[in-house]
Amino acid sequence: MKVSVVTPNYNGKRFLKTFFESLDNDSELIGEVIIVDNASTDGSKEYIGSNSFDFPVKIIENTENVGFSPAVNQGIRNAHYEYIFSLNNDTEVKKGSIKALVDLMSSDDNIFSLQAKMLQYDNKELIDDVGDEYNLLAWTKKTGENHSSDEYTEVCEIFSACAGAAMYRKSLLLELGMFDDNFFAYMEDVDLAIRSRIYGYRNLLCPDAIVYHIGSATSGSRYNEFKVRLAARNNVWVVYKNLPIPLKIVNFIFLFLGFFIKYLFFVKKGFGSTYFSGIKEGLSTRSKIDKVKFKSQNTKNYFKIEYRLIINTFKFLKK
């Protein structure tokens, strides 16, 4: 089974040598690498064009930075293979990792996504992310962050895969509507994961797939105005889009507290007005977002999602 690797790139030339060299280790499983370039000006396209690789490399050139979600969707639509490996450019893939993902994905047709075990590039003894968890407060948490790389060694259910290093089925991506182009960046993978859960599909950690991740390579620091505003806006959209009215009512007090506490947090960080403007933008533009239509056959899956949100909230509060 061949794999289509889909990678957005925006001025990431400095990462591409390591990125491509690591993919060469599993070249027999790579049917194609699709680089979606968001109008880079650092010579990224010229670097790719001047090198030869052990697999076909296709560059899709955008005339502007369209964002992560639209870029990945462009790659998915152009992919020739069922298994899509969504991979950030600031990564190094350990040999054998793509095979581990393919083997696990092919074991169950109900698997929608697989999370690679992402380790910190500058300290490979520590975990960067082994799946994202979402809770009643509408907070997303990277599972395993800063834990020892010796942990999380078993295949397990996760709420959402991080699209920085995750394998998806193209047929199910098309069925669910792929990533939401409106999001531009941030929270698009959680939104997609909730949709997959609504329809009863599974998201798993594949611990034998190791990807070293630099992190914040395109957007910069952990907190900045761009990230804070977009994440706030997109989080409003995630709730509006995916939760049916009964769950919105049941969870209202938790959602309100979650957004309010986050606002106070960002006030202390100096980004209070930025976060609040993101919330306002999310509320005022929600009409542009296509809500997931409620279907009675998915009722039990909504109960499962609510249960997972409750469990994730207790896990967070215990720490």
Image: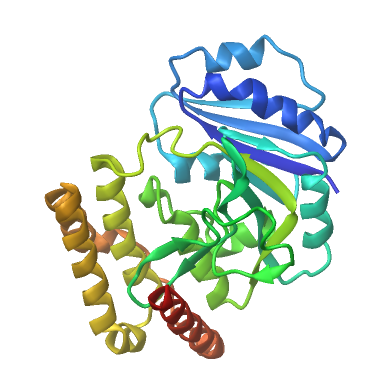
Residue appearing at x 75%, y 39% in the figure? 94
Q: How many numbered discs sit on the rendered protein?
A: 0
Q: Residue furthest left?
A: 273
Determine the image quadrant of residue 290.
bottom left
Determine the image quadrant of residue 220.
top left
Image side of residue 296 versus residue 268, left or right: right
Residue appearing at x 41%, y 39% in the figure? 67
Q: Position of residue 254 (x, y in %)?
A: 28, 80
Viewer-nearest residue: 45 or 12: 12
The answer to whether 313 is drawn above or below residue 266 in the figure is below
Q: Please state, as top left, top right, bottom left or bottom right, where the C terminus lies in the image.
A: bottom left
Q: How is the image coloured?
A: rainbow
Determine the image quadrant of residue 200.
bottom right
The answer to whether 15 is drawn above or below residue 140 in the figure is above
The answer to whether 71 is drawn above or below residue 200 in the figure is above
Q: Position of residue 72 (x, y in %)?
A: 54, 43
Image side of residue 135 versus residue 3, left or right: left
Q: Position of residue 138 (x, y in %)?
A: 34, 70
Q: Is residue 22 visible?
A: yes
